[in-house]
């Protein structure tokens, strides 16, 4: 046994806060409903994220049965069932936006600034995510407790809370260092699902943003860049659809 699942998390609306699940199915697109909703900048025709609009991280989301409820920083709530949701979100962010769902046949366009240290830097990079979801890259993301412990030792003043990194699977493993990166190229059996470990997760300005009681901290990303080439955690492809629960063992398939 390589380790054990200690948390399962999903993020129904891209860049808003997620929530823990006791268990979940994993399909080809990851957890059903994960990053299924996004906030579209109407003028730019871009699905915005906290890479460019950090206020999104101040919103909390609950999702169930194809709907989402969004709690804004002032405590008010809106969501997919609210006919005024686009007006509410536009007033909050100060420009025209719409709450949208991922189109199964389309790839969304995202953007990021040129410098994580300077939010005023213009956009220098746009890319398209995978079809049918608002994930940036792969459909599932895993991080280990060993990795969090390893990076925390490199920046003792930093708050390396898991919410900064937005994984779907948080796993407890034995060993030291960036353990899950040693699994790249392997297939993992977790619950009734199987996952191919594709590549390290490249980190960006998202990890430095203030959120959920955590302060803005540019040294979070500086440390990841210095110690591990800008990577933390791994990206997964769902090799066999199935179900994963907290406490499930992780085995080589």
Image: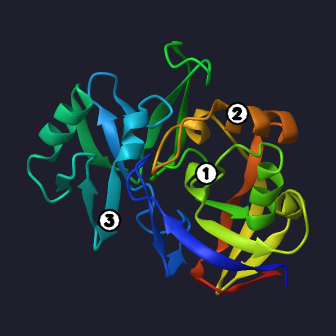
Along the horizontal axis of the image, is 128 left or right of 224?
left
Measure the alpha-carbon separation of dots 3 and 2: 31 Å
**Residue to which mark 2 is pinned:** 219
Along the horizontal axis of the image, is 31 left or right of 39?
right
Q: Quick check: marks 1 and 3 in contact, CB under 8 Å?
A: no
Q: Residue at x 76, y 46 (%)?
A: 156
Q: Secondary structure at mark 2?
A: helix
Residue 230 placement (x, y as % from top left): 77, 37
Residue 126 placement (x, y as % from top left): 54, 25
Q: Is residue 164 above or below residue 42?
A: below
Q: Nearer the viewer, mark 1 or mark 2?
A: 2
**How many marks do you count on the picture?**
3
Q: Is residue 184 above or below residue 53?
A: below
Measure the alpha-carbon separation of dots 1 and 2: 14 Å
Residue 145 placement (x, y as % from top left): 75, 66
Residue 185 visible (yes or no): no
Q: Which mark is residue 155?
A: none
For marks 1 and 2, the one nearer the N-term is 1
**Residue to which mark 1 is pinned:** 165
For marks 1 and 3, the one nearer the N-term is 3
Mark 1 packing: few (<14 Cα in 10 Å), some, or many (20+)? some
Quadrant holding the N terminus: bottom right
Residue 3 placement (x, y as % from top left): 79, 79
Q: Which mark is residue 62?
A: 3
Along the horizontal axis of the image, is 113 left or right of 40?
right
Q: Residue at x 28, y 68 (%)?
A: 66
């Amino acid at each position: 046994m390589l380790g054990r699942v200690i948390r399962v998390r999903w993020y129904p609306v891209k860049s808003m806060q997620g929530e823990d699940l006791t268990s979940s199915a994993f399909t080809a697109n990851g957890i059903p409903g994960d990053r299924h909703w996004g906030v579209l900048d109407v003028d730019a025709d871009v699905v915005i994220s906290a890479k460019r609009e950090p206020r999104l991280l101040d919103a909390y989301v609950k999702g169930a049965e194809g709907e989402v409820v969004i709690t804004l920083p002032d405590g008010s709530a809106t969501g997919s069932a609210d006919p005024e949701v686009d007006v509410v979100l536009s007033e909050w962010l100060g420009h025209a936006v719409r709450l949208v769902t991922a189109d199964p046949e389309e790839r969304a366009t995202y953007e990021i600034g040129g410098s994580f240290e300077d939010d005023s830097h213009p956009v220098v990079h746009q890319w398209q995510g995978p079809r049918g979801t608002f994930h940036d890259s792969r459909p599932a993301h895993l991080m280990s407790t060993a990795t969090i412990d390893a990076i925390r030792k490199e920046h003792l003043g930093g708050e390396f809370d898991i919410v900064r990194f937005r994984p779907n699977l948080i796993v407890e493993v034995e060993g030291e260092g960036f353990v899950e990166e040693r699994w790249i190229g392997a297939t993992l059996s977790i619950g009734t699902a199987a996952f191919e470990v594709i590549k390290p997760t490249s980190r960006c300005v998202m990890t430095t943003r203030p959120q959920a009681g955590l302060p803005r901290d540019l040294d979070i990303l500086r440390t990841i860049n210095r110690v591990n080439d800008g990577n933390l955690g791994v990206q997964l492809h769902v090799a066999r659809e199935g179900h994963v629960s907290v406490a499930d063992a992780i085995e080589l398939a």
